[in-house]
Every structure is written in structure tokens, then in C-alpha cells.
């Protein structure tokens, strides 16, 4: 492998960085920086010059010592000096120097006193308030570091909706307890039920003398205060989640709610309509000239531009404004519309609770039926069922159903779709079940053509009823597999199959845009918990949130059907 000048220059720069952190002689440091620049600007590779027998000391800023170091790197690919320096301080430390405001002296102190070696550790130290205690740092520096790190990382980490909800709920409860506080609403992407949120945007109305700001910034979970004024503040919680709080006037509450719920694209579209009518819409209200014409509640804001109130989940500027204008807004499905759940596991495979516990928990969650869909044998890691164990579970379900009241267990399986589109259990075994949920758990990286074909062939199997987590993504962990979703949806239509919207907070899969596609093609979607424990039926609300973002109405959702109607739909005629 030839060594390029840029590689040599990068090594010299790193040597300079490390010497600096160590507090070496400034002339020595500068020598390496200058040499790095000289090499970086050299039109010919140093290796080629050396091969020709050229003398590198003729180059500006390169003496005997540096020329020897260049030769070493060209010949061995290494610098023994750099190797030694790297042993003295961990490799990632130099990245810290790229954070604005952090020079070598501070990096050195952070490393020695707080064992900060990476940008992430720096972020945590700042967030936890450990940096302010270091000599020469202080609270203001710590805050600047936090902001600089956030800017450096660029896309600050996003939180899964369900995780953000935990922080949001306790914070809302806390704020509601503050004297003088009236309304508290979490707006932003959280209210739109996006699958992940960047930060929380909380709106509050309160009496003028309410100490809501002081209480907010003193909240137990606050790790750092980014800004704090009389009507707005931003903090970072210990979890790293940023929270923006606004105190707004009662008369502006609706306008603020529209504004801070967003999305930005939706807001811009609304403002454009208002402008055409000579109105101005902002977070303080709707104005004609200086006269306020609306803003107390959201409906008044939309009414001022002749629109019905648009549900937050639709506010993405994806056609909702046109639909509102034409009276075509969907009546979105609600959590209370769900009658059952078609995907759950028990202790028999990788779940945590018994059949009975799962049945009772589903009933307590307001459901009337629950399909037990264990993994099939191929998924050995999850103790997948073979035909014999499946038959035993079916007997047990029969016994329980005879005994239980108000909830019916359905017999199902989450059968593996093998690479060629065949299923992990024979047709005669599957034919005895109430439903067959098919899922991909292997070979995620097949080509688009092959992956799509695999799913289509699985749907061709006579007893296949429901495609589990159709995209296969894990939020912020694994990309969806490459498939032609429109073909899959159309094939499901042709075969009388259905698609799942898996409500697990790590999945939320079917995507919202594909829900919309399924609806347009006339394929019903089942919002399922994929519960592995009796506590996970509460995740259904995130699934319903996503279904709403996908414009689904009650009739578009398979498991809003009463059991008898559901059974008819599950019996395939094709
Ligand atoms: P996030 O936090 O990244 O998950 O997404 P959002 O939608 O919560 O965005 P965020 O927190 O930056 O701002 C909250 C809302 O405030 C956003 O949905 C719309 C509104 N907003 C923010 N910046 C602007 C802007 O420049 N123009 C308009 N019209 N609205 C904005
Ligand atoms: Ca936000
Ligand atoms: Ca925000």
C-alpha cells in the first residue's frame, strides 16, 4: 500500500495534537504542523521523491529529523513516535480538540481528572454537571461545551417515542403540580406521534405569578440548563433529552399549540393560505392588521382559514390541508376501537408470561381476543415450536378458552418465512390454526427482487394470513430490508392476506406512508403489540399513533372487527 502525502500529513498533525495535550515545547509542536502543511501541499508523493533519491530536507520546514520520520512512514506505514504517543493517551482523545472551546490544556484536564476520552463521554460529563467542578472550567464553560458537542454531533440523538413518553409523562405531572399552572401540553413531534422525537416542546398556561419557570429548571431530572427566561426555557434531562418549555397567554394558547405542534412544513402551508386572505398567523394568534381574530384554541386558528381542525398526526403537509379543504379528512382510528391483538408470545417461546397471564392482561387492556403466535422451530434462539409443541399449546388454549370469560385466545403461529418463500411448518399443521403470521428473521440483505419474491411466495401458501413487521427495520438500529412494498400490498390484496403494523416501540413497522398505501389498495392492517410480556399491551397506543399518521380509519384496521367478523376475514377464500 503506497503511503500518500495526506496520510503522512495526518500523522504529523496527530503527533502535534498529542504533543500539545502533553504540554510539549511549542516549537516542536509547530515544526510538526508546518511539516504537515508542506507535505499536504506537495504535488508529488514523498515516497516517489525518496525512490528517486531526492533529499527531503530541501523542502521548506523539513529538517534531518523530520525527513527521517517521513522515510519511516513511507517505508513501514508507521511512525514509532506516534505509536508511543498513542500508548500514552487513548486514540480518541484528539477528537476532543475539534470541539470549539476545547484546547489541549482543557482536553488534558478532562482526560486526567474525569477520564473523558471520547466526545460521548464529554457529552455525558457535561450533561451530568461534572465539568463545572474542574479548575478553570465553571458552569458557563460546561454549558458551552454541551452546546458545542450537540452542534458537533450534528444530528443530536433522537429518542424513541415510547422512551420520550416516559420522560414526558412524569414531567407533565410535575408541571401540573406547580402552583398557578393551568394547561400543560406536549406539542412538537411528540404530539404528532412521530416514531422518534428530537426534543420535547411543552406549552403551559399559568397565572402571572406562577413559579413555573423556577420549578421547571429545578426539576430533579434536569442535568443542565441551556437557557432560561421569563416565558421560555430549555433544559437537558439526565437522559440527554432536551426539553423546551414555553409559557403562553390563554388567548394565544391555540395559536401556540398549532405553531409548536408543527410540523414546520404544515405551518408554512397554513401561513401561506392565511396570507392570501390578508391574515397573519404566528404563535401569538391570527391577526388582521393589528386586530387579533383567532388563537384561543386550535379550532379557531383553522377556522380562520376556513378549515376544520386537523388531527396532529396528519400535520405533515402530505395532503391533509387539501383533504381538510375538500371535507375529506379521515376519521382516524382510535385506541379504543381495537377489539383484539393478533400477535403475542408466551413463556413457551421467548415471552415472559403464561398463556393465562397474557389472556388476562389483554382483557384488562380492553381487548376481547388475543392471538397467540409463537415463533416456529427455525428460530431456535427463541425456542421456536415444532408441530408437536404447537399441538400441545393448541390443546391448552382450548382448555383456557373453555374457562375464561370476556377474552378469547386464538391459535396462531409466527412462522418463519424461509429464503425461498416457503414456510417453516407444513401446510397441514398451519391449516389447523386460526391464523398464520409470517415473518422474516433471517437473510435481511437479499436483493430487492429476491426479498420481494420471497414474501410474495410466502403469501401464496394457502394458510398465510398476516405479514408481520413488513419492513423489518429496527428504529435507529437496523434499516428496513429492500422490498417493493407496493407489489407486496397488491399481492396481499390478491391473496386475501393482511399486513401487520407492529406496535413495538423499536419497530413501528408498517411505516406510516405504507399504511396509506395499504389503505389506498384496500388491504387492511392489523395493529399488533407483538407482546412478549403482559405489560406490553400498552404499546398498542404507539401502533395506533402510527396508524393515524398513516391516515387509517377504524375500518382500515383488521383488529377493530368483532371476533365473528374477524374469523370470517381470516378464512382465506383465495
Ligand atoms: P423534533 O423535535 O426534531 O422531533 O421535531 P419537532 O417537529 O418537534 O421540531 P422542533 O422541536 O424543532 O420544533 C417544534 C415545532 O415548532 C415544529 O414542529 C414547528 C415549530 N417550528 C419550529 N421552527 C419553526 C420555524 O422555523 N417555522 C415554523 N413555521 N415553525 C417552526
Ligand atoms: Ca421537538
Ligand atoms: Ca424544540
Image (tube, rainbow, N blue to C red):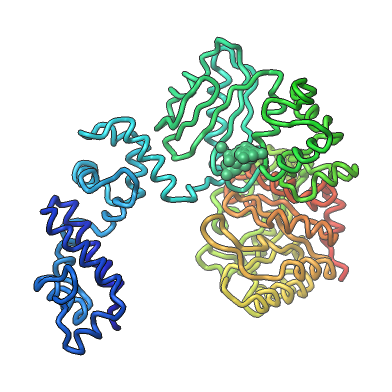
Quarter of the image that includes the C terminus: bottom right
Residue at (59, 22) in percent of width and height = 247
View quadrant of ligand 3: top right
Work out whether residue 8 or residue 214 is closer to the camera in this orientation and state it.
Answer: 8
Measured as percent of width and height from the top left, residue 480 is found at 60, 64
Measured as percent of width and height from the top left, residue 198 is found at 54, 43
Looking at the image, residue 121 sits to the left or right of residue 366; the answer is left
Q: Does 18 sit above or below residue 109?
A: below
- Where residue 327 sits, quadrant-wise, is top right
Residue at (82, 49) in percent of width and height = 563
**For the view shown, which residue lies furthest in the right direction?**
326
Quarter of the image that includes the N terminus: bottom left
Residue at (61, 50) in percent of width and height = 504
Q: Does 541 sit above or below residue 233?
A: below
Work out whether residue 408 or residue 497 is closer to the camera in this orientation and state it.
Answer: 497
Looking at the image, residue 517 sits to the left or right of residue 125; the answer is right
Q: Is residue 56 visible?
A: yes
Measured as percent of width and height from the top left, residue 123 is found at 36, 44
Work out whether residue 393 or residue 518 is closer to the camera in this orientation and state it.
Answer: 518
**For the view shown, which residue lies furthest in the bottom direction?**
52
- Where residue 46 sits, quadrant-wise, is bottom left
- Where residue 55 sits, quadrant-wise, is bottom left
Residue at (66, 42) in percent of width and height = 264
Amino acid at each position: 500500500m503506497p503511503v500518500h502525502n495526506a496520510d503522512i500529513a495526518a500523522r504529523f498533525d496527530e503527533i502535534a495534537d498529542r504533543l500539545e495535550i502533553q504540554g510539549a515545547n511549542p516549537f516542536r509542536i509547530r515544526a510538526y504542523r508546518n511539516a504537515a502543511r508542506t507535505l499536504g501541499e506537495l504535488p508529488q508523493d514523498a515516497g516517489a521523491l525518496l525512490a528517486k533519491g531526492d533529499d527531503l530536507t530541501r523542502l521548506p520546514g523539513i529538517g534531518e529529523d523530520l525527513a527521517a520520520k517521513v522515510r519511516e512512514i513511507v517505508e513501514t506505514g508507521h511512525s514509532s513516535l506516534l505509536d508511543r504517543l498513542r500508548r500514552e493517551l487513548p486514540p480518541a482523545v484528539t477528537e476532543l480538540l475539534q470541539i470549539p472551546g476545547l484546547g489541549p490544556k482543557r482536553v488534558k484536564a478532562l482526560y486526567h481528572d474525569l477520564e473523558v476520552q471520547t466526545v460521548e463521554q464529554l457529552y455525558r460529563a457535561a450533561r451530568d454537571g461534572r465539568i463545572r467542578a474542574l479548575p478553570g472550567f465553571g458552569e458557563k464553560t460546561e454549558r458551552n461545551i454541551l452546546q458545542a458537542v450537540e452542534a458537533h454531533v450534528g444530528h443530536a440523538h433522537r429518542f424513541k417515542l415510547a422512551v420520550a413518553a416516559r420522560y414526558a409523562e412524569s414531567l407533565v405531572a410535575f408541571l401540573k403540580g406547580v402552583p398557578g399552572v393551568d394547561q400543560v401540553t406536549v406539542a412538537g413531534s411528540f404530539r404528532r406521534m412521530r416514531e422518534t422525537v428530537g426534543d420535547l416542546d411543552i406549552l403551559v398556561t399559568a397565572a402571572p405569578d406562577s413559579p413555573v419557570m423556577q420549578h421547571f429548571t429545578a426539576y430533579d431530572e434536569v442535568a443542565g440548563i441551556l437557557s432560561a427566561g421569563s416565558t421560555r426555557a430549555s433544559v437537558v434531562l439526565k437522559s440527554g433529552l432536551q426539553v423546551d418549555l414555553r409559557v403562553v397567554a390563554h388567548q394565544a394558547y391555540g395559536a401556540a399549540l398549532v405553531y409548536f405542534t408543527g410540523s414546520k412544513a404544515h405551518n408554512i402551508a397554513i401561513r401561506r393560505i392565511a396570507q392570501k386572505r390578508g391574515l397573519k398567523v404566528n404563535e401569538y394568534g391570527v391577526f388582521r392588521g393589528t386586530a387579533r381574530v383567532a388563537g384561543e384554541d386550535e379550532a379557531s386558528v383553522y377556522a380562520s382559514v376556513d378549515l376544520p381542525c386537523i388531527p396532529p398526526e396528519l400535520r405533515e403537509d402530505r395532503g391533509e390541508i387539501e383533504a381538510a379543504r375538500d371535507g375529506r379528512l379521515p376519521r382516524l382510528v382510535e385506541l379504543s376501537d381495537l377489539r383484539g391483538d393478533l400477535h403475542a408470545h408466551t413463556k413457551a417461546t421467548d415471552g415472559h408470561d403464561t398463556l393465562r397471564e397474557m389472556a388476562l392482561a389483554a382483557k384488562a387492556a380492553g381487548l376481547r381476543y388475543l392471538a397467540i403466535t409463537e415463533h416456529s422451530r427455525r428460530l431456535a434462539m427463541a425456542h421456536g415450536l415444532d408441530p408437536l409443541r404447537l399441538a400441545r399449546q393448541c390443546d391448552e388454549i382450548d382448555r383456557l378458552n373453555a374457562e375464561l370469560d370476556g377474552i378469547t385466545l386464538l391459535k396462531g403461529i409466527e412462522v418463519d418465512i424461509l429464503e425461498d418463500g416457503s414456510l417453516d411448518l407444513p401446510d397441514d399443521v398451519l391449516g389447523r390454526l386460526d391464523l398464520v403470521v409470517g415473518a422474516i428473521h433471517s437473510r435481511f440483505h437479499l436483493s430487492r427482487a429476491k426479498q420481494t419474491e420471497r414474501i410474495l411466495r410466502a403469501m401464496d401458501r394457502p394458510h398465510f394470513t398476516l405479514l408481520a413487521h413488513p419492513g423489518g427495520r429496527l428504529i435507529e438500529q437496523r434499516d428496513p430490508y429492500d422490498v417493493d412494498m407496493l407489489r407486496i400490498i397488491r399481492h396481499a390484496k390478491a391473496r386475501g392476506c393482511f399486513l401487520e403494523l407492529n406496535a413495538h416501540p423499536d419497530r413501528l413497522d408498517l411505516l406510516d406512508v405504507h399504511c396509506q398505501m395499504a389503505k389506498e389498495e384496500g388491504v387492511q392492517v392489523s395493529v399488533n403489540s407483538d407482546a412478549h410480556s403482559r405489560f406490553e399491551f400498552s404499546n398498542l397506543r404507539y401502533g395506533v399513533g402510527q396508524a393515524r399518521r398513516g391516515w387509517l380509519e377504524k375500518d382500515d384496521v383488521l383488529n377493530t372487527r368483532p371476533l365473528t367478523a374477524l374469523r370470517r376475514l381470516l378464512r382465506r377464500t383465495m
